[in-house]
Amino acid sequence: MAGKAMTKTQVLSSLAESTGLSKGQIDDVIEAIGSLIGNELNAGNPFNVPGLMKVTTRIKAAVPAGPRTNPFTGETKMGEAKPAQTIVKVRPLKGLKDLVAAPTADAPAAADESAGESAGESAGESSSF
């Protein structure tokens, strides 16, 4: 994995620098977008951030209490009831996919070569005994 995600302060500073707006104005815009997304999703509507992502909700049905079978052992035991849940899904759109750089073709080949070299070295060492 790559490094850590940017903090809120880093995001505000970066956007303020690139747009020329103050950090307070950027913070207000982000809060307004958040409340707009929440209002739209609560109304049952999907929300699009044009070219970047689509935010939708899905209702996951309630599960009644009852016997559950462990698929690995076959053991049956009583399971608890689970209430209905609202699941929020975020899908990337084409614009965001295009912004993300694809991995280079050299990276996997280099990893395979180094793994092969280390395996060959260890095999060579074991055969010399």
Image (tube, rainbow, N blue to C red):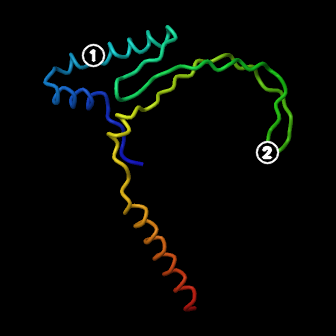
> Residue 48, position in %: x, y?
40, 21
Q: Quadrant of residue 22?
A: top left
What secondary structure is marked by label 1? helix
Against 129, residue 59 (above or below) is above
Is residue 98 positioned above or below 11 on the image?
below
Amino acid carrying label 2: it is: Phe
Question: From what the image shows, is residue 105 above or below residue 125?
Answer: above
Residue 50: percent from the left, percent from the top? 34, 24
Q: Residues within 10 Å of mark 1 (few under 14, many from 20)?
A: few
Disc with the residue nearer the chain's start (1 vs 2): 1
Distance between the Cα atoms at labels 1 and 2? Answer: 50 Å
Mark drawn on residue 116: none
Label 1 vs label 2, nearer the camera: 1
Element under label 2?
Answer: loop
Q: Is residue 63 left or right of residue 110?
A: right
Q: Residue at x 41, y 15 (%)?
A: 37
Name the residue beneath numbered marker 1.
29
Q: Position of residue 114 (x, y in %)?
A: 43, 71
Residue with the mark numbered 2: 72
| Residue 52 in the figure: left or right of residue 15 | right
* Closer-to-camera residue (49/111): 49
- The residue sitting at the bottom extreme is 128
Q: Quadrant of the C terminus?
A: bottom right
Residue 99, given in percent of the width and then of the height, sits at: 32, 39
